[in-house]
């Protein structure tokens, strides 16, 4: 199945999307290795969709072990123009309660081990990342939430930590002092790579807990996370389905032009090997 418009990256608790017809498993090879899982492709009405399980089938990958480059490259290779990312997060604010849904529009990086660029080793590019989330896509998601009468916070900052451990109490309170909204372990590398790949990207963050800062609630543990994810996953699937059906044929954002003035290496110095390797990413900007 080719020319797939929409990609879905599912995280903890969201490991499939129902209602897809013409399902097939696709194995995509990338120059960065294998994606986290086989990609499940299908149709939602007439829209071609690809689903990728972020942590692999059976949840076998730590956040630091996920091959983010392979995941985004594989979706780009299939023709994906839009990615909806679903993930579990903790709340850093009293008013953002467990079982709420947050649609972040900013990220703050506290990771240490992530490779989050396709560039380097002979080619340099610097993309604009001031606004990491596609505002047009996020607004569609928010409007869908309103139509479904699902309460959602429209905007906020997602602080991305290395994991796999949850925060210490000192770290949690530190993040709160900077007015961050939610905390997670996975979405920032995806957002950076999606921008380089000129793919619209938006996060549907499912709040499972209050991290460990809240004195009146028990500290976050995996039992709590899964318990609340199960409750929230049905809403997440409804949001994804309805968002896909409402996506316009023509995009009004600039995500598809992110590399237009970003590659600064002279083309005559870019090797044929690099050109072939990154063709799905940079091919539109090569003269030869």
Image (spheres, grey):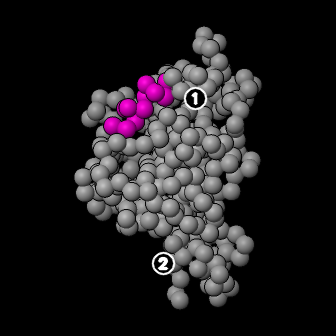
Residue 92, image x, y percentages: 59, 27
Q: Is residue 76 above or below residue 109?
A: below
Regarding mark 2 in the picture, which secondary structure is present there? helix
Query: As displayed, is residue 278 above or below residue 173?
Result: below
Q: Residue 168 appears at what percent x and percent y?
A: 74, 26
Instruction: Please give the name of the residue rendered at 58% of the width and 40% of the height, measured from the top-left corner.
Output: 59
Whether residue 67 appears in this view of the structure is: yes
The magenta stretch spans which residues? 228-239
**Quadrant position of residue 255:** bottom left
Total numbered badges shown on the rendered structure? 2
Tag 1 secondary structure? strand
Mark 1 — residue? 90
Residue 130 percent across, percent down from the top left: 56, 53
Between the residue at mark 2 and the residue at mark 1, the CA separation in whole angstroms equals: 39 Å
* Residue corresponding to mark 2: 284
Label 1 crowd bin: few (<14), some (14–19), many (20+), radius 10 Å:
many
- Give whichever of 171, 45 is nearer the camera: 45
Residue drawn at (33%, 37%) of the image: 238
**Residue 24 left/right relative to 272:** left
């Amino acid at each position: 199945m080719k020319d797939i418009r929409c990609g879905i990256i599912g995280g903890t608790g969201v490991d499939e999307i129902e209602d897809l017809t013409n399902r097939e498993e696709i194995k995509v090879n990338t120059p960065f290795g294998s994606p986290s899982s086989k990609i499940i492709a299908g149709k939602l009405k007439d829209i071609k969709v690809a689903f990728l399980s972020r942590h692999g089938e059976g949840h076998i990958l730590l956040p630091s072990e996920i091959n983010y480059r392979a995941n985004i490259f594989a979706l780009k290779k299939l023709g994906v123009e839009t990615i909806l990312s679903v993930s579990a997060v903790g709340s850093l604010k009293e008013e953002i309660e467990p079982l709420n849904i947050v649609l972040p529009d900013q990220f703050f990086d506290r990771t240490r081990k992530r490779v989050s660029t396709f560039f380097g080793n002979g080619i340099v590019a610097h993309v604009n990342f001031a606004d990491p989330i596609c505002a047009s896509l996020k607004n569609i998601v928010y409007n869908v939430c309103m139509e479904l009468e699902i309460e959602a916070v429209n905007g906020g900052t997602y602080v991305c930590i290395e994991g796999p451990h949850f925060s210490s109490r000192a770290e949690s309170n530190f993040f709160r002092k900077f007015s961050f909204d939610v905390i997670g372990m996975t979405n920032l590398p995806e957002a950076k790579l999606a921008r380089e790949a000129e793919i619209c990207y938006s996060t549907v963050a499912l709040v499972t807990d209050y991290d460990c800062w809240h004195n009146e609630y028990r500290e976050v543990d995996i039992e709590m996370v899964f318990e609340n994810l199960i409750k929230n996953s049905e809403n997440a699937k409804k949001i994804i389905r309805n968002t896909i059906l409402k996506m316009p044929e023509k995009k009004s954002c600039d995500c598809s032009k992110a590399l237009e003035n970003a590659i600064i290496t002279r083309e005559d110095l870019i090797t044929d090997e690099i050109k072939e390797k990154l063709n799905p990413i940079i091919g539109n900007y090569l003269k030869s």
